Amino acid sequence: MSSGRPDRKLWLRRVGWLVLIWAGSIAALAVVALLFRLLMNLAGLTA
């Protein structure tokens, strides 16, 4: 059997991609929310 080192690198790379995709989706959601808020303010709807 090989050492656990290559498996650990693969695991870290997969978790890194997961975190990157998660952060990207949160950022995209924030942009959409800000655009909706801007459009609502332009239409005269305020909270």
Image: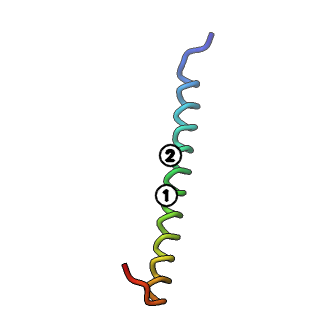
Task: Pick the quarter of the image with the N terminus.
Answer: top right
Residue visible at 43% across and 85% down in the picture: 45
3 lies above or below 27: above
Mark 2 or mark 1: which comes first in sequence? Answer: 2
Query: Residue 11: x and y, percent?
Result: 55, 31
Asked whether 21 or 16 is in front, the reply is 21
Q: Which residue is mark 1?
A: 26
Amino acid type assigned to the residue bearing label 1 in the image: Ile
43 lies above or below 16: below
Q: Which label sits in the foreground, 2 or 1?
A: 1
Disc 1 crowd rating (10 Å Cα; few below 14, some 14-19, many 20+) is: few
The image quadrant of residue 14 is top right
Furthest toward the left, the residue is 47
Q: Which residue is mark 2?
A: 19
CB-based contact (under 8 Å), mark 2 and mark 1: no
Query: Residue 3: x and y, percent?
Result: 56, 15
34 lies above or below 25: below
Which circle marks residue 41 in the picture? none
Task: Pick the quarter of the image with the C terminus.
Answer: bottom left
Secondary structure at badge 2 equals helix
